[in-house]
Amino acid sequence: MVKGDKKILLVTGSAGFIGMHVSLRAVAEGYKVIGVDDLNGYYDVSLKLSRLEQQGITTKEIYPGRLIWGNSGIGFIQGGVEDRNLINRLFNEFKISKVVHLAAQAGVRYSIDNPQVYIRSNIDGFFNVLEACRNNKVVHLVYASSSSVYGLNRTVPFKVTDHVDHPISLYAATKKSNELMAHTYSHLFGIPTTGLRFFTVYGPWGRPDMALFKFTRNIVEDKPIDVYNNGNMSRDFTYIDDIVEGIVRILEKPPTQRSMDELDDDDPSRSVAPYRICNIGRNEPVKLEAFIDAIELATGKKAIRNYMPIQPGDVERTYADVSDLNKLTGYVPKVAVNEGVQKFVDWYRNFYRL
């Protein structure tokens, strides 16, 4: 159907929160999108299927290993990136020019009890994507890193020039490993790669394991919410539309090789290789208590707050310096937290018919 198309984009994790939004935006930008997702049971699979339906995919036709096309220019195949044969098949059958790699096992706390899943998905899976990009001369690989790589960093805002050598969760360690692997492939094989360190993405169709989803559900149902570190947390909450805008903009600007004279010795995010790292966030941390206040305002209900100590693997605050992404693409996040939370609550009520 689309074999030979010069604008074919592979989106891994396309049934995920960010993957759904990226796929829809990419189609609007003129891409033919091929999405891949294993539809694992880390959280409610029916939500993932509903996201696919938003992309025009007839979910009754989904069968593992079979590529089907929706009515919106988006194709989908059920499978994991750790399946090397599947990934190679997609690259061999279609002239994929660019990749947005979002598939990964998410969650900081989950990684403490289920470490093997993170190695299989986040390390082995990313290796398969890199190998396929190497063998098929991909124009640009944009992949999801995470703000969690900053670990115990106390200097704010977090900058890509910071050294990130002290992760405090296996999830963070796998994301740092992805950055190192990407640099190696960029250097050895000339693959243009951009790693985006995401900062607490939220919005409609978000993940049920994220704070906004859990808090909204419990507040609506008059159940207590667990507030970690006794509420002394802050996050650089970034609305999904702003995240997608940054992704599609940077996708059009693959990095190029440079000379040693062009580099800053103190900037580990840049290299002579066609490689870069960028933060993608709002550049405005919000206290957790204020975030809960915004949910109360949007729902019209008061939260029952259960204050608890900080959990293993958590950090007290995140705060993104996005100046590099701004210089490269003109990226400026626009959606304030109160507005974004209201949009999520409106979606939540509509989706669950409340």
Image: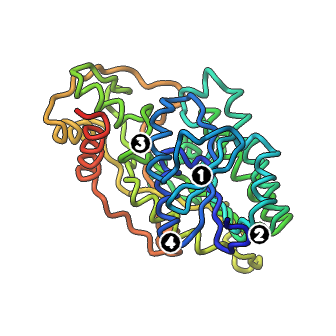
Residue at numbered disc 2: 273
Q: Nearer the viewer, mark 2 or mark 4?
A: 4
How crowded is the residue under tag 2: few (<14 C-alpha within 10 Å), some, or many (20+)? many
Label 4: which residue? 29
Mark 1 or mark 2, earlier in chain? 1
Residue 121: percent from the left, percent from the top?
A: 69, 38
The percent coordinates of residue 186 (x first, y second) are 78, 64
Gap in angstroms between the C-alphas marked 3 and 1: 16 Å
**Residue 266, can we see it?**
no
User: Label 3 belongs to which residue?
Assistant: 206
Q: Find out whether the residues at labels 2 and 3 contact each other: C-beta distance under 8 Å.
A: no
Contact? badges 2 and 4 (CB < 8 Å): no
Is label 1 in a helix, a strand or a loop? Answer: strand
Circle 2 or circle 3, nearest the eye:
3
x, y (%) of residue 177?
71, 45
The nearer-to-camera label among 3 and 4 is: 4
**Disc 4 residue type (three-letter):** Glu
| Residue type pointed to by label 2 | Ala
| Residue at image coords 30%, 29% | 217
Report if residue 171 is visible in the image. yes
| C-alpha distance separating marks 4 and 1 | 20 Å
- Tell me which label, 3 or 1, sits earlier in the chain: 1
Q: Is residue 212 left or right of residue 277?
A: left
